[in-house]
Image (tube, grey):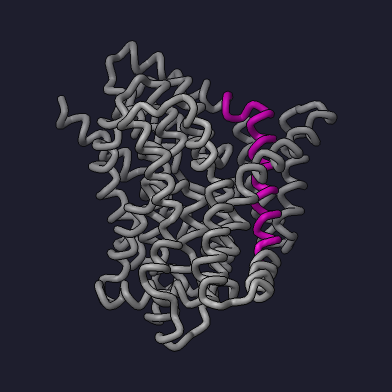
Amino acid sequence: MILVLLVSILILILLISWLKINPFIAFILVSISAGLMLGMPLEKIPLSIQKGIGDTMGSLILVIMSGAMIGKLFAESGAAQRISIVMLSLFGKKYITWALMCTGFLLGIPLFYNVGFVLLMPLIFSIVYQVKLPAIYVAIPMLAALSVTHGFLPPHPSPAALVTQLNADMGTTLLYGMLVATPAIILAGPLFAKTVKHIACTPRTTFIPREMDESKLPSFSTSVITALLPVFILIITSLLPLIYAIPTTLKGVFVFFSDPSMLMFICLLFATWSIGLSRGTSIVSIMNTYTEALKDMLMLVLIVAGAGALKYVFADGGISNALADMLKGLALPPLLLGWLIAAAIRVAVGSATVAGLTSAGIIAPLVLATGTNPNLMVLAVGAGSLFFSHVNDSGFWLFKEYFNLNIRDTLRTWSVMETIVSVAGLAGVLLLNSLLH
């Protein structure tokens, strides 16, 4: 099965890079061939592909499209330009990457990764065009921070579920996670960004902000409230239940507003008013802006759907279980073993959430038997779940398409950044474990 995984990934890379096949078509071709090589019944391969596309798009379509429309409106209205002007005045060009790293970390705690990614892209691109710095150099620190919070810290789905499954403590895990996350973000963010500063890219024109006279820009407060509305909502819906006992009658309301798809759609409606209609922009003009944003995102959506199809074929074909069984018998320290299992599943199926949750079921008995600190195991598995994002991960394609990179440069930037985050996270967990004993 491991050979099938390697061959499938190689075929995918050759189809896209060498033969110049459209990535969506390449994903479907490789999904079919992988299913055949894994011995899946012919009638089940289409079902896996359809389920992969449906489940992936079901959770992402509103997030991506709403985020794209908000981003386009941010660029067209001047809201992104206003925020970038204030940030530059506060931190200066010299420390802008560190400012973006801190911003990404703070916003990443309550924001789901895909929500944060599409919401912050306009801000990144606005700063890029303001300071005339390479886009990759500016973006990596913020995206590294978003990635770490997604993999390490509750209330994100995988860490929160791991806390429950491993009987860890949410507050302690969050505290330890921040200690481990800080050096990981610094290494994978501002420091790593310096090494890829030379990689040129031309970001998609969708998010290139129009230069406007400062007197015509939205106010800073309006721009920030619009940008941070998802943060405010998620702080209330995610963190409040950890502090207070929410009445049963209100739990449905909290679930509704914290759902990423509904959250982004609500924020889209608010942005339509706050930086559009309230400033005298006609509804026709705003809708035209949204139409242009959707046109530019169509191929990205198809690529993400294709990645979802391949991920499900790998899972249904038994690759993740085969990897887990192979690694489970290794005589390694529990924390390292948890990281290794999550990393292997991540490479195989692409999804950090799937890697984390699959690993939890395998490693939970070992945590109990060996007396391993469950809070640290949550972080070890979370770090492993971020290891080496590549062509079967939707995040890989989001980054590639937003920055208009080729596969080679995406591997040199995004994939290496994710690997640094993962390895640095493991090192931090092992060091903290030694200090606690």
The quadrant of the rendering that contains the C terminus is top left
**Residue under the image location 59 percent in, 72 percent down:** 206
Residue 113: x %, y % from top left: 47, 49
When asked about the image quadrant of residue 56, the answer is top right
The vertical placement of 44 against 209, above or below, is: above
Extreme residue in the top direction: 369
Nearest the eye: 323 or 297: 297
When asked about the image quadrant of residue 339, the answer is top left
**Residue under the image location 40 percent in, 29 percent down:** 246
The vertical placement of 322 against 45, above or below, is: above
Q: Is residue 127 rendered to the left or right of residue 168?
A: right
Nearest the eye: 163 or 284: 284
When asked about the image quadrant of residue 243, the answer is top left
Magenta portion: prevailing SS class: helix
Nearest the eye: 365 or 14: 365
The vertical placement of 295 against 66, above or below, is: below
Q: Is residue 320 rendered to the left or right of residue 133?
A: right
Q: Is residue 192 rendered to the left or right of residue 282?
A: left
Residue 7 visible in the shown view: no
Nearest the eye: 322 or 54: 54
> Which stretch appears magenta?
296-321
Residue 65: x %, y % from top left: 63, 57
Residue 387: x %, y % from top left: 44, 43
**Residue under the image location 33 percent in, 11 percent down:** 369
Extreme residue in the bottom direction: 213
The quadrant of the rendering that contains the N terminus is top right
Residue 74: x %, y % from top left: 51, 70
**Residue under the image location 55 percent in, 71 percent down:** 276
